[in-house]
Amino acid sequence: MRIDIISIFPEFFRALDISLLGKARQSGLVDVRVHDLRDATTDRHRTVDDTPYGGGAGMVMKPEPWGITLDHILGDRSDVSGADAASAEPGASGREVDASEADAPEADDRPIVVFPSPAGAVFTQSTARRYALERHLVFGCGRYEGIDQRVFEDTARRARVELVSIGDYVLNGGEVAVMAMIEAFGRLIPGVVGNPESLVEESHEDGLLEYPSYTKPASWRGLDVPEVLLSGHHARVAAWRREQQLERTRRVRPDLLPPELRGTDGE
Ligand code: 6GU
């Protein structure tokens, strides 16, 4: 998988050299390239922002450095310029298509360009599963009050554009959000985690929160590991864990449960 990241704080992503994804990069499974948006500026001050048309507080990121950087990452625009880009779809190009191809349009293999934004759709485990199977992801980290809207429109001419939020709170920029997203989907890339079974038993994969875990010693500071876990009775352990998952999810995240499992005595 190839991952490109555009940011005015490229040093931020040095953390990707370590840990799980660092190993995946060394093994050649993942190719991460970080781009400094300011490298695409031409003025002495390497300006990436300007005042908003129509007035208002804050600054808006200028379109030109974004266009130059995205052109570099996505390739030049020869495939969409000239001929009408909107008609560049299977069957509209004048070449012959057989019936099966015309009936079932092929999967969209264009890169996904993700713009982290509190105004985006919320990133979930299902988004992570989807990204983990992509061939090429690009992350465009905005700062200030946002990016000139035309950048999204121009990018959508040659890529799948997604505005994505990591939750209902406001960050100063997209960098931390992108790190969170990469951490979530990176471990789901086939081959990155040694034991794929460790992925299926955790929070959110089955729609419930994780059950509590214990290790030795069996008694610590007067606190005992639940008896059932010492029993060696696999069916009873599995039932206890399921009950714990349900209880925990009911208490802290009832919104994750289907209504019939929700109960009435939440906190
Ligand atoms: Cl993706 N970006 C910013 N700036 N703030 C956020 C966010 C993203 N997700 C939640 N808050």
Image (cartoon, rainbow, N blue to C red):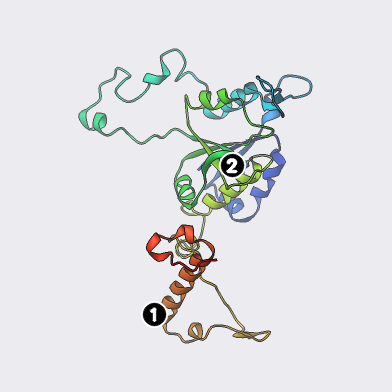
**Is residue 108 depicted above or below 68 in this figure?**
below
Q: Is residue 189 left or right of residue 64?
A: left
Q: Which residue is mark 2?
A: 32
Mark 2: amino acid: Val
Q: Which residue is mark 1?
A: 235
**Is residue 90 depicted above or below 5 in this figure?**
above
**Residue 136 showing in the rendered view:** yes
| Ligand 1: image quarter | top right
The location of residue 181, given as percent across then percent down, is 56, 47
Q: Is residue 47 left or right of residue 79?
A: right
Give the residue displayed 48% in from the left and 71% down from the top.
247
68 or 145: nearer the viewer: 145
**Is residue 203 depicted above or below 84 in this figure?**
below
**Residue 205 showing in the rendered view:** no
The location of residue 259, given as percent across then percent down, is 40, 60
**Badge 2: how crowded within 10 Å, few (<14), some, or many (20+)?**
many
24 or 170: nearer the viewer: 170
Q: Which mark is residue 190?
A: none
Taking the view exactly as shown, the residue that stands out farthest to the front is: 264
The location of residue 183, given as percent across then percent down, is 58, 51
User: Does the Cβ of the disc 1 residue fall within 8 Å of ligand 1?
Assistant: no
Mark 1: amino acid: Ala
Q: Quadrant of residue 39?
A: top right
Give the residue displayed 52% in from the left and 22% down from the top.
76
**Badge 1: how crowded within 10 Å, few (<14), some, or many (20+)?**
few
